[in-house]
Image (cartoon, rainbow, N blue to C red):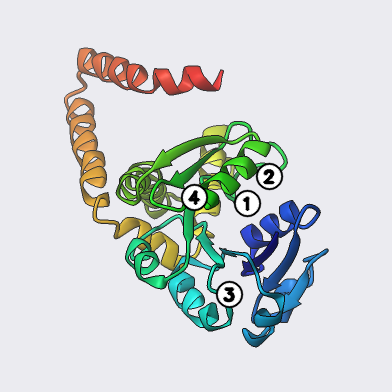
Amino acid sequence: MRILVMGAGKMGSFFLDLLSFSHETAVYEKDPLRMRFTYNCRRFTSPEEIREFSPELVINAVTVKYTIPAFEEIMPYLPSQCMLSDISSVKTGLQAFYEQCGHPYVSTHPMFGPTFANLSQLSHENAIIISEGCAEGQSFFRKLYASLGLNIYDYTFDEHDRTVAYSLSIPFVSTFVFAAVMKHQDAPGTTFKRHMSIARGVLGEDDYLLQEILFNPYTHDQVSQIRDELKELLNIIDSKDSEGMKAYLTKIRNNVKPDIDKIK
């Protein structure tokens, strides 16, 4: 299959490496310097070059702010049956775009990234395939993700956004709060250093991506839970309520136990 990857960032380069030995691949990237570590693929810096390549599948791996504009830029140069796909962690506006674009499409979200995941060992990582996409596209990515050992889940666009509001916004906001109140430590402990490592990774993400995740219409209710829990915890601390603290710790341990048991 002739596959065009848009964007030579970390995830775009990851997909190029993954696909280049079993497919004919090309990358479209306006900044030539970003393509210096891409191999076994053709390199395009202008959309006109895409016409001759005639891709059968496009994987859009540009930053989320430009996902739809990037599609719109290259569509005049694509064959009519070329399949469009994205790996965006935020799907805002994509369903409406796909439904009027005139191309078959598939949308997925590999729930890992180069910030934290070990890209050579992904058996504990997950991927979402959006159920509204075409059968051929879903089959392609299902086989691809299965070959990496990923756990694969099928969600609608709406279910995906609800999941992201929980699985990304709560950790992100918790990290923001930690970063906002932290003070420099000359001799930090292990727990502090682990939190700092997480903060470094999250705060190194694209500002627009962080904004879009937090502006997800489902994020508010999730973040409100943090406020409610902090209020309860502060009341226990202020009153030095030993029994209340014991009950609270039992509650949160039971809450995370099923997921912790899965990791063991």
- The residue to which callout 3 is attached is 79
- Label 2 residue SS: loop
Q: Are marks 3 and 1 in contact (CB under 8 Å)?
A: no
User: Is 189 or 127 nearer to us in this picture?
Assistant: 127
Residue 114 got which mark? 1
User: Which label's residue is closer to the chain start, 2 or 1?
Assistant: 1
Q: Are marks 4 and 1 in contact (CB under 8 Å)?
A: no
Q: Is residue 185 visible?
A: no
Residue 102 rendering spot, x and y as whole percentages:
42, 71
- Of tags 2 and 3, the one toward the viewer is 3
**How far is mark 3 from mark 1, CA to CA?**
32 Å
Badge 2 crowding class, 10 Å Cα cut-off, few under 14, some 14 to 19, many 20 or more, is: some
Which residue is the site of mark 2? 119
Name the N-terminal-most of marks 4 and 2.
4
**Residue at point 71%, 81% (across, down):** 52
The structure residue drawn at horizontal position 79% and vertical position 72%, both measured from the top left corner, is 36
Q: Amino acid at mark 1?
A: Pro
Could you tell me which secondary element the residue under label 4 belongs to? Answer: strand
Q: Nearer the viewer, mark 3 or mark 1?
A: 3
From the top left corner, tell me how far across and down residue 213 is, in percent.
36, 56
How far apart marks 2 and 1 lie (CA) works out to 7 Å
Dot 4 alpha-carbon crowd within 10 angstroms: few under 14, some 14 to 19, many 20 or more: some
- Circle nearer the N terminus (3, 4): 3
Say which element carries label 1. loop
